[in-house]
């Protein structure tokens, strides 16, 4: 899978809960339509997500974008999605978002999917931090993610 153009990632991975609020957000397209099926559209969606996050001061910890939905874990002060308040729950959800391309069957290893943070995380975090977060079980997490994704061949 070809990587999209180089992107200026928002920050080095801190991976800690924030008193202002750490959230996991999942959003999908209307009727789960595959509006972002092509590599170009996925790249546009990812650039837009990173740009908006930076513009509004959201500190992204993990993200994945797909043809009809996206997930991200971020710190900011005012939102109503699932607020993460326990360290283990937070770290497991970071792993979930990083591993989401594997869950959807798009790649065998998450860092091979260019529209998520797994590769960036593995390049910028300390090896012990990567091992710790990737060690959290995600098979029993309750995250709304009943999407079937598509990618243009």
Image (cartoon, helix red, strand yellow):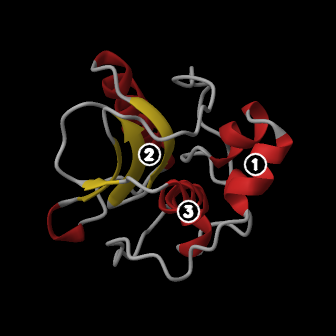
Earlier-in-chain disc, 2 versus 1: 2
Q: Secondary structure at mark 2?
A: helix
Q: Residue at x 24, y 69 (%)?
A: 32
Viewer-nearest of discs 2 and 1: 1
Judge whether 104 appears above or below 9 on screen: below
Q: Is residue 71 left or right of residue 20?
A: right
Q: Quadrant of residue 106?
A: bottom right
- Residue extending furthest right? 127
Residues under labels 2 and 1: Cα distance?
Answer: 25 Å
Relative image position of residue 97 (x, y in whole percent):
51, 57
Visible in this render: residue 125?
Answer: yes
Q: Is residue 150 left or right of residue 115?
A: left
Is label 2 in contact with label 1 (beta carbons under 8 Å)? no
Relative image position of residue 113 (x, y in whole percent):
63, 53
Disc on res. 42: 2
Disc on res. 92: 3
Image quarter where the C terminus lies is bottom right
Earlier-in-chain disc, 2 versus 3: 2
Viewer-nearest of discs 2 and 3: 3
Q: Residue at x 68, y 55 (%)?
A: 133
Q: Residue at x 46, y 76 (%)?
A: 141
Q: Secondary structure at mark 3?
A: helix
Q: How many numbered dots are placed on residues in this image?
A: 3
Disc on res. 130: 1
Relative image position of residue 67 (x, y in whole percent):
38, 59
């Amino acid at each position: 899978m070809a990587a999209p153009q180089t992107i200026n990632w928002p920050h080095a991975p801190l991976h800690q809960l924030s008193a202002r609020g750490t959230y996991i957000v999942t959003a999908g397209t209307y009727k789960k339509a595959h509006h972002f099926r092509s590599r170009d559209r996925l790249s546009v969606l990812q650039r837009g997500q990173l740009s908006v996050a930076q513009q509004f001061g959201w500190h992204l910890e993990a993200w994945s974008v797909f043809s009809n939905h996206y997930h991200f874990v971020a710190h900011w002060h005012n939102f109503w999605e699932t607020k993460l308040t326990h360290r283990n729950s937070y770290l497991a959800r970071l792993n979930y978002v990083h591993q989401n391309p594997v869950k959807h069957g798009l790649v065998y290893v998450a860092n091979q999917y260019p529209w998520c943070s797994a590769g960036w995380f593995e390049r910028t975090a300390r090896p012990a931090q990567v091992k710790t977060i990737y060690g959290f079980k995600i098979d029993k997490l309750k995250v709304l993610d009943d999407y079937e994704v598509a990618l243009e061949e």
